[in-house]
Amino acid sequence: MKRILINKDSWQTRVAILNNDRLQDIYFDTHNKEDLDRCFFKGRVSKVLPGIQTAFVDIGQQKAGFLHITEIDRALAMEKVTEHMQAEDGREELPEREVKSNLDVGKIFSEGEDILVQVIKEPIHEKGAKLSTCFTLPGKFLVLMPNIPHLGVSKKIENREVRTQLRELMQASLPPGMGAIVRTTAEGRDIQDIVKDLAFLISTWKSIQKKFKKAVAGEKIHEDLPVSLRAVRDHLDEDVDVVICDDQEELRSIHKFIKYITPEHLGKLRYYNGPPTLYDRYDIDTQLDKALQKKVILKSGGSIIIESTEAMTVIDVNTGKFTGTGSLEDTILKTNLEAADELVTQLRLRNIGGLIVIDFIDMSSSSNRQKLSRTLERCLKEKDKFQSVTLKISEFGLVQMTRKRSGKTLLQQLTNVCATCSGCGFLKSVPTMSFQILSAIKEEIRSKALTETLTLTVSLKVFDYLIHQEYQSILQLEKVLNCKIMVESSEKFDDSQHTIKKM
């Protein structure tokens, strides 16, 4: 059973997608924080760097967004470069091959120029938003690409006849110069529903173009639907049994939206009034807490460890307590197959993208490795809506794969970097901190030529270590530096802090 649970409070809206009561997707909208993903802005080019083929664009945010040449639509790039080259050599007509060879961000944009951009990746850490002029407008049944004349059909629609019909429908309905990707939800739908969705998206695009002309630089022109409506648009289909909301005002908004896009699903909408709270009823917060942990226990007793860095995510598979009842090879295969299914669920829930390396337990049988590869690919196709590419299992049992990035990971959304360890997950030991403090005070006493009686203040743990383990070292310092050192502790100090003062 698949459910969509919508919890709205005055401070936050949360949408959970459950499959057989297990958390599959989670979305958040904090009301005091601006959501930039998929938003359109009237941007102003603030800097052009041909060396890295990137233009920085002011979109009214704290940091300028960056627009790489690969995210500039071909028609715009060709038009701008042609104008630039014509202005340089005065020719009225230029060969397309010559224009292509001169594609350079410095010839496409100039500083101070106003351009329409869309955010495709929100700011992360020190980076500004990633921008694009290859625009997309998502609907219920298709994604409109208003300036990219490309036509595609979801790979999950496998029936060739249906795919052909949908392509022909789009070719007949799309205005010149526009493209679209037909979503899986279009399969089996009435033609009028798809055409209606397309007409709405085209109308939205025309509205964006009008607003761009009137807007000032840095102004937001268009944003996607609120998180609750966005989730209903993207997830509500025949597989969903019920949509539950705990806020009556939000319920009315969702009712109106469903009535417009998919009225046949109106009977699935329910109001929840507790107690307990909606998310307590379905154990959402407990499942969220588990999704923030590195270790995931498998039903068999095995486990997977998930660790992410800026460059990649590494997943390690272990047999753990699982010993199996057959041969060692069978035990390993069963653990690997279970891990393949579970890690796809975790990648989706945690919203992990980019480069991913999976360290499966090594298997000697080539047929077992092939079986594992097929299982992983099948799970990705069936359970994950984002595009991914996997390579064959290496001789060391490693699988390299990539998964499309989409916004922040669950960890980035719900946690902050630890102020004590700066995210490394380790703290220096008390002996290490004690040695660093002794070295620091030695240098300070020597550089300042201190010869009086001095008071060294440290944390309780460092004090205990210095007095019981390094007392002779302090006496030696006093002798070498010709001073007297009194050691005291402070409950307010952590292990890295110390002060040395004259008495």
Image (cartoon, rainbow, N blue to C red):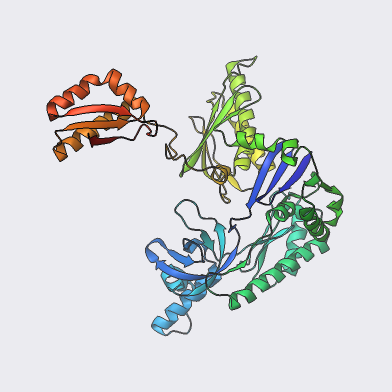
Above or below for 196 versus 444: below
Q: Residue at x 51, y 58 (%)?
A: 129
Q: Is residue 187 visible?
A: no
Choose top left, top right, bottom left or bottom right for residue 176.
bottom right
* Spot occupied by residue 395 in the image (x, y as percentages of width and height): 49, 30
Is residue 468 found left or right of 266 in the rendered image?
A: left
Is residue 257 found left or right of 435 in the rendered image?
A: right
Is residue 146 found left or right of 362 in the rendered image?
A: right
Above or below for 249 versus 425: below
Q: Is residue 129 visible?
A: yes
Residue nearest the viewer, comparing 488 with 170: 488
* Spot occupied by residue 69 in the image (x, y as percentages of width and height): 47, 64
* Spot occupied by residue 264 in the image (x, y as percentages of width and height): 86, 54
Quadrant including the C terminus: top left
Choose top left, top right, bottom left or bottom right for residue 477.
top left
Q: Residue at x 59, y 74 (%)?
A: 212
Residue nearest the viewer, comparing 289 with 95: 289
Is residue 409 found left or right of 99 in the rendered image?
A: right
Number of numbered discs present?
0
Q: Residue at x 49, y 71 (%)?
A: 44
Residue nearest the viewer, comparing 363 with 60: 60
Q: Residue at x 72, y 37 (%)?
A: 280
Quadrant including the N terminus: top right
* Spot occupied by residue 320 in the image (x, y as percentages of width and height): 57, 21
